Image (cartoon, rainbow, N blue to C red):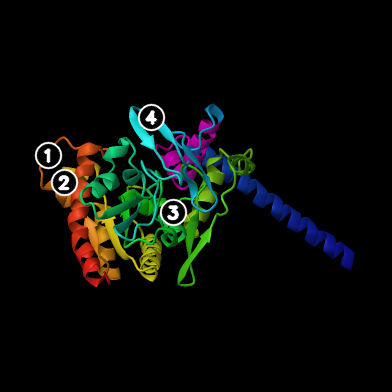
Amino acid sequence: MSLGATARALITRSLRGLGTVAIIALITVAITEITARFVPGLPSRVRSLEPERAWEDRFLEMMHKDGTLVVGGFHRPHPTRGWTVAPNAHQVVDGFRYTTNERGYRSLRPYTPDSAKYTVLVIGDSFTFGIDTNDEETWPYLLETKDPGLNVINLGVGGYGIDQMDVTLQETVGVYHPDLVIIAFIGDDLRRTFLSFRDYKKPRFVLDRGGVRLTNVPIGTPDAVISEIESRRRWFDHSYTFGLLRGLTRVARGYTMPPADKPLPTDAMELDTRLLDQMRDVSRRNGAEFLLVYLSYGEGLFDANLTEEGEAFLRNYGEHAHVPTLDTRPAFLRQHRVDWVKGHYQGRENQVVSAAIYERILPLMSSASRSSPH
């Protein structure tokens, strides 16, 4: 057989082989698509591999409906944090008054450094910002009222995870020169670190060579984010097969949030730990104490036998990092009430939290007073 004939034979066999592979692939896709529609729970499992998609859908719906960025309508994009609260906002939402100052933080007054007072910089999520709570009933506001020597700065923003808290602290600690930095978190904040999109596109840290690396920034305008989402949504977007492949790829890269019914894996614990280490270190470099506060809510306020993921993380982190911590759950359980709200804190719950935090920081305030040259 001539060289040309041999080459043609090889090409023919290769094409036949590729054709066979293509047919097998198509059959596999068809079987997967059909199976996914009849196996109970499988579609939701596939969707759980890409939890951001539900948040993206909500964002697109809200932008189409009334152009609001985050629920409440007083948020705006932020290039490194994802979103933040608009300045000088005065709104009533669901009967609750929300006021922000000239810098866009929940407050009835401007935030300014005050060397005559013990300045506490508070960073957290919606429980700290005070969703479903009037301006005078947030726990940072109530904390400040407990002592005329306190200057409490509330930088909480609804929906934030540990990662956005880290970025916020890095960008603001040098502005306010606090004596104490409080990071207040709920258990879900540990999982939000694994999202690249929640209420809006957000920063995403990944483990990298013994440290962390920031990705998914700058965030971009709402129009740019909408275009970015739509560019990823092709004709196969609703295919279970491609959704499964995308999701498994994310899992392999450690780039997906663990399901709520599964414990945080080791790499997730490590990422959140490293971010908190960064916050502890930047606080100390700026001359501030660091306090990590766990905000318990829901069934945790009623059931003493419940095991809470965030509570366990707080205990482990305090031992690892040798930093002051506070678990608010015992303060609720000691009162044996059956009428705590199960969602966002309101006035009564915020009173409990502010009292517990004030009691915890008193020794830190006393120590700072003794070491002051004044």
Q: CA distance from mark 3 to mark 2?
A: 27 Å
- Residue at 39% in and 43% down: 158
The kind of residue on which mark 4 rests is: Val
Q: Mark 4 or 1, which is nearer the eye?
A: 4
Say which label, 2 or 1, has the lower sequence index. 2
Image marks 2 and 1: residues in contact by CB distance under 8 Å: yes
What SS does tag 1 mark? loop
Say which label, 4 or 1, has the lower sequence index. 4
Say which label, 4 or 2, has the lower sequence index. 4
| The image quarter in which residue 342 lies | top left
Q: Is residue 313 visible?
A: no
Query: Would residue 239 be found to the left or right of residue 115 on screen?
Result: right
Q: Which mark is residue 332?
A: 2
Classed neighbour count for the residue bearing mark 4: other residues with Cα under 10 Å, few (<14), some (14–19), many (≥20): some
Residue for badge 1: 337
The residue segment tinted magenta is 37-63
Q: Is residue 336 visible?
A: yes
Q: CA distance from mark 3 to mark 1?
A: 33 Å
The residue lying toward the viewer, choosing from 163 and 256, is: 163
Q: CA distance from mark 3 to mark 4?
A: 24 Å
What SS does tag 3 mark? helix
Give the dominant element type of the magenta stretch: helix, strand or loop. Answer: helix
The kind of residue on which mark 3 rests is: Gln
| The image quarter in which residue 242 lies | top right
